């Protein structure tokens, strides 16, 4: 029995030894050494073959080929740097540990994608649920980025090594390879396609690149690395509600203040419009407070950032926030100084705080009544409780609000009554003096010549009144001018209604003028004489020579000088342009059926700048000759009674006067378009 047991034991040990020996012998025979792989892939000239090259055994460029690779990567380098591989985190890993489908060399097919989850199971599980792999709706993303896209393929340094693409100084560049590619951002429907470019200008990136700091927020610090989630995901680190805590990982002191503030508590309650860090500082393009382009710079705080919520009427109506506070600040001494570029004047944050903002009823608030002397004292040493009594923002309400209201109303009406009375008084004075001048004019001891008949004077007055009405109401529409003491609704109606009524009246006047010019002998003759002639060019040169003192006399002008012709032709051209563009803007819906949107934009530009051109031309050119010109100052009465004296005719229209005298000498009646001598009845 004893002998039998010993034989059985020896047989069992022998069998175990044999199996172990076979496994030892079989192992090396089936596994590939990395050196065998580098025999081919360690050659820098190794390239993949295309199917045609493989069939003809052609060697493109004389480079060594990999005959074992299928033609899926024609011309692509298959080189693996042995030195970099030995320095990587995978230096002790066999090639076949990752490329498990390689059983022998040469291998004849394209290798399968490497599955890193065999070693990195936890990371792979988290990444498989991330926004890189799945959409917000949990649908797979085609051509999602793989591990190698961020970490590299064979040369995978440790993340703490500066050559690693996921080293903290290199993270932004690695992410930008995709997030800075417009094709990728468009195809992947990325919400903020310009994020990569914005981050490059941020204080976080500048701290790493320019200042050389060892730690500053990079992409993964906010978004996460492998477990990145969509901003709409409630568990995302960049979800609106979670963002303050994410920023608080670095800015923990600020976060502690913010989460107890009126903004932080509102966000915690789920108020959808409550501002978080990004709403004030920005998301990717976060700049230093001293940067003038920062939304939290001293200039931007009160002009843009805080008003974006506190001056928004919809938000104000939703949460009961008074919008007049922003308007009141902008009209205050502080606000006016800030608009003039004063960077030291108090802004919203100076009084309310920046992160620790509390309601004025909270004793912790810097604007709590008992705390105001300290708050104001930061800029105004020695400030007392009386210093800040009243409405800091300007406007109704606050201490003494009714007194301020009635004082303001008193002065408004004082201005209206006093200045209005002065205008009326001086208006009567001017009228009586001009009346005296006109009576003196009626006593001419020489013939008067009728330059404008009654129909022409009516056309001129209609054109004058409608033009200036259009100018005033047009610029009022453009710049939102309002009449004081009248409601906004009435002002809007007045601006739009009066502009359109004046436009219709000017068009009617223009039609009247066209009929007059076509169907009356005098009108046809006047228009014919308005056509430019070569003599006008000679007159321009002659006049300039006279102004420069090169000759003693101005040229003699005919019925119309080059000045009057230029004014008339400009009026015709301007009227046509303004009517066409005005109707396009008036009837936008109908216009857009026939022209593209950019055509309407062009019409808007033309209408605006033609209005400026016409207004300045009338003021600088026409009104000079009517009011400022010393020959007629303080005003030419011709547009009222249509007459010129013989003296004025000799100086302004000498050639036409010679023509009139010739008709008189011959006893002939001048044509209708020639200026006639006025009679006593005229």
Image (cartoon, rainbow, N blue to C red):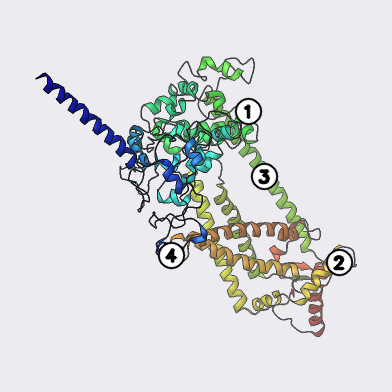
Q: Mark 1, residues whose alpha carbon is within 10 Å: few (<14), some, or many (≥20)?
A: some
Quadrant (top left/top right/bottom left/bottom right) for the C terminus: bottom right
Q: Which secondary structure lies at badge 4?
A: loop
State the residue at coordinates (43%, 21%).
260
Answer above or below: position of 246 versus 28: above
Residue located farthest toward the front when viewing the structure as drawn: 3
The residues tagged by marks 3 and 1 sit, at their Cα atoms, a distance apart of 39 Å
Evaluate whether residue 24 shows in this view: yes
Answer above or below: position of 185 versus 262: below
- Label for residue 545? 2
Q: Mark 2, residues whose alpha carbon is within 10 Å: few (<14), some, or many (≥20)?
A: some
Residue at which label 1 appears:
345
* Front residue of 101 and 544: 101
- Label for residue 593? 4
Quadrant of the rendered image containing residue 27:
top left
- The percent position of residue 266, horizontal first and vertical second, equals 40, 27
Whichever of callouts 4 and 1 sits on the residue coming sooner in the sequence is 1
């Amino acid at each position: 029995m004893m002998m039998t047991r010993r034989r059985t034991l020896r047989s069992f040990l022998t069998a175990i030894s044999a199996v172990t020996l076979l496994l030892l012998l079989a192992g090396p025979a089936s596994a590939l050494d990395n050196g065998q792989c580098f025999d081919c892939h360690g050659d820098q000239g190794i390239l993949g073959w295309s199917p045609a090259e493989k069939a003809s055994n052609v060697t493109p460029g004389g480079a060594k080929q990999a005959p074992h690779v299928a033609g899926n990567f024609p011309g692509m380098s298959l080189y693996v740097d042995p030195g970099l591989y030995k320095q990587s985190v995978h230096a002790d890993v066999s090639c076949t540990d990752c490329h498990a489908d390689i059983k022998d060399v040469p291998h004849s097919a394209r290798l399968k994608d490497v599955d890193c989850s065999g070693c990195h199971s936890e990371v792979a599980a988290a990444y498989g649920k991330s926004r890189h792999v799945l959409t917000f709706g949990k649908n797979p993303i085609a051509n999602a980025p793989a591990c190698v896209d961020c970490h590299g393929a064979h040369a995978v340094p440790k993340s703490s090594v500066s050559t690693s693409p996921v080293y903290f100084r290199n993270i932004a560049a690695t992410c930008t390879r995709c997030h800075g590619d417009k094709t990728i951002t468009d195809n992947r429907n990325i919400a903020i396609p310009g994020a990569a470019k914005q981050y490059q200008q941020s204080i976080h990136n500048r701290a790493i690149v320019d200042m050389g700091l060892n730690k500053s927020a990079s992409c993964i610090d906010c978004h996460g690395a492998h477990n990145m989630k969509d901003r709409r995901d409630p568990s995302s680190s960049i979800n609106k509600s979670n963002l303050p805590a994410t920023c608080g990982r670095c800015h923990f002191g600020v976060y502690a203040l913010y989460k107890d503030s009126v903004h932080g508590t509102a966000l915690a309650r789920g108020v959808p419009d409550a501002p978080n860090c990004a709403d004030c500082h920005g998301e990717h393009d976060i700049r230093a407070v001293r940067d003038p382009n920062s939304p939290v710079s001293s200039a931007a705080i009160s002009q843009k950032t805080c008003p974006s919520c506190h001056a928004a009427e919809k938000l104000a109506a939703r949460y009961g926030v008074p919008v007049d506070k922003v308007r009141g600040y902008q009209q205050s001494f502080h606000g006016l100084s800030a608009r003039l570029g004063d960077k030291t004047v108090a802004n919203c944050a100076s009084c309310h705080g920046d992160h620790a903002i509390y309601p004025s009823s909270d004793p912790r608030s810097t604007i709590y009544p008992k705390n105001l002397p300290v708050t104001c004292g930061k800029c105004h040493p020695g400030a007392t409780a009386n210093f800040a009594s009243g409405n800091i923002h300007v406007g109704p309400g606050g201490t003494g609000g009714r007194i301020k209201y009635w004082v303001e109303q008193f002065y408004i009406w004082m201005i209206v009554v006093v200045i209005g009375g002065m205008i009326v008084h001086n208006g009567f004075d001017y009228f009586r003096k001009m009346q005296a001048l006109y009576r003196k004019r009626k006593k001419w001891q020489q013939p008067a010549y009728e330059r404008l008949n009654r129909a022409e004077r009516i056309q001129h007055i209609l054109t004058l009144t409608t033009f200036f009405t259009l100018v005033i109401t047009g610029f009022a529409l453009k710049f939102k001018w309002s009449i004081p003491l009248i409601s906004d609704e009435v002002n809007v109606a007045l601006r739009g209604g009066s502009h359109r009524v004046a436009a219709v009246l000017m068009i009617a006047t223009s039609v009247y003028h066209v009929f007059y010019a076509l169907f009356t002998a005098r009108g046809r003759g006047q228009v014919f004489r308005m056509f430019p002639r070569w003599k006008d060019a000679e007159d321009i040169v002659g006049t300039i020579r006279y102004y420069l003192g090169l000759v003693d006399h101005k040229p003699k002008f005919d019925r119309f000088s080059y000045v009057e012709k230029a004014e008339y032709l400009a009026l015709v051209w301007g009227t046509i342009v303004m009517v066409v563009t005005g109707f396009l803007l008036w009837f936008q819906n109908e216009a857009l059926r026939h022209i593209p949107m950019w055509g309407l934009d062009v019409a808007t530009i033309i209408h605006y700048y033609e209005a400026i051109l016409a207004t300045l031309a009338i003021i600088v050119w026409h009104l000079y000759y009517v009011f400022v010109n010393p020959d007629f100052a303080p005003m030419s009465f011709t547009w009222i009674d249509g007459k010129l004296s013989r003296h004025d005719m000799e100086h302004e229209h000498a050639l036409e006067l010679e023509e009139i005298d010739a008709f008189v000498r011959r006893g002939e009646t001048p044509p209708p378009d020639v200026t006639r001598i006025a009679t006593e009845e005229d």
